[in-house]
Amino acid sequence: MLLLTFHSCLAANVAKDIFILAGQSNMAGRGGVEHGNWDGNVPPECRPNPSTLRLSGKLSWEVAHEPLHADIDVGKTCGIGPGMAFVDGLRANGSRIGGAVVGLVPCAVGGTKISQWARGTRLYNQLVSRAEESVKDGGMIRAILWYQGESDTVRKEDAEAYKGNMERLILDLRSDLNMPSLPVIQVALASGEGKFRETVRKGQLAINLPNVRCVDAKGSRLQTDHLHLTTMSQVHLGLKLAHAFIASFGRML
């Protein structure tokens, strides 16, 4: 039955509510990863659903499954991120999306600074290309979910420039995707690679562009590396992102 439902979703080219997942390792997902190995634990909120698809690295739709970024954030061990729990939260909270086919577009790459996502870079071009591919068969991009900045906490100048760089990135993506009102939900850091975490967080929390919201991950439980969120922290973050989307943008559906 699962296989039949899956093929029906793809064959019908039904309209999909599409969400772009971008940023660095905590968006790509390191939940359950210790010493380079993923423990394989998939919480109920992150289990496959025939109505939740992902755009693979080869640009084909498939039933979404953890780790979502395994063929995108290559060269690293991926685990649980917030994406699957985000969709589960949309459905659990009675969003109209609950009855639709949701498409997730993984784009996050671990260890990347925001300068590596600027317009014209490989990561930026890849995000735009995957986003455009995701709507070729119908559907609409509903939001970009962004979790990044840990790598910008090392150098003071990078941390101080974060707010301006993030605002520019949002405006460039909206322009190049021809979606001037595209919602963006960013995550304020829970951790950082350097001592300027609070400087980056201050910039994230101060962004005041239309249709931009911030979900704060501060206080989330971290793994033993003190950098990456645990599996359950990722689940909780995904649910918080879903609540923020419904509260702020549910009227746009």
Image: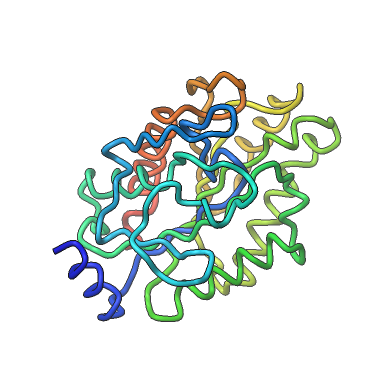
Q: Is residue 52 left or right of residue 120?
A: left
Q: Quadrant of residue 118?
A: bottom right
Q: Position of residue 228 (x, y in %)?
A: 57, 29
Q: Quadrant of the N terminus?
A: bottom left
Please say if 70 is above or below 179: above
Please tell me whether residue 129 is drawn above or below residue 109 in the rendered image: below
Q: Residue at x 77, y 66 (%)?
A: 120
Image coords of residue 12 (percent x, y): 25, 80
Total labels drawn = 0
Locate residue 223, reporting x and y percent. Answer: 53, 22
Of residues 49 and 173, the one nearer the viewer is 49
Q: Residue 199's spot in the image, x, y percent?
A: 73, 28
At 65% across and 48% down in the image, what residue appears?
Answer: 75
**In the displayed structure, would residue 128 be above or below residue 249?**
below
Q: Residue at x 54, y 27 (%)?
A: 34
Quadrant of residue 170 within the rendered picture: bottom right
Q: Which image quadrant: the C terminus?
A: bottom left
Horizontal side of 174 relative to 220 (left or right) equals right
Q: Quadrant of residue 64?
A: bottom left
Report the side of 51 relative to 203 (left or right). Answer: left
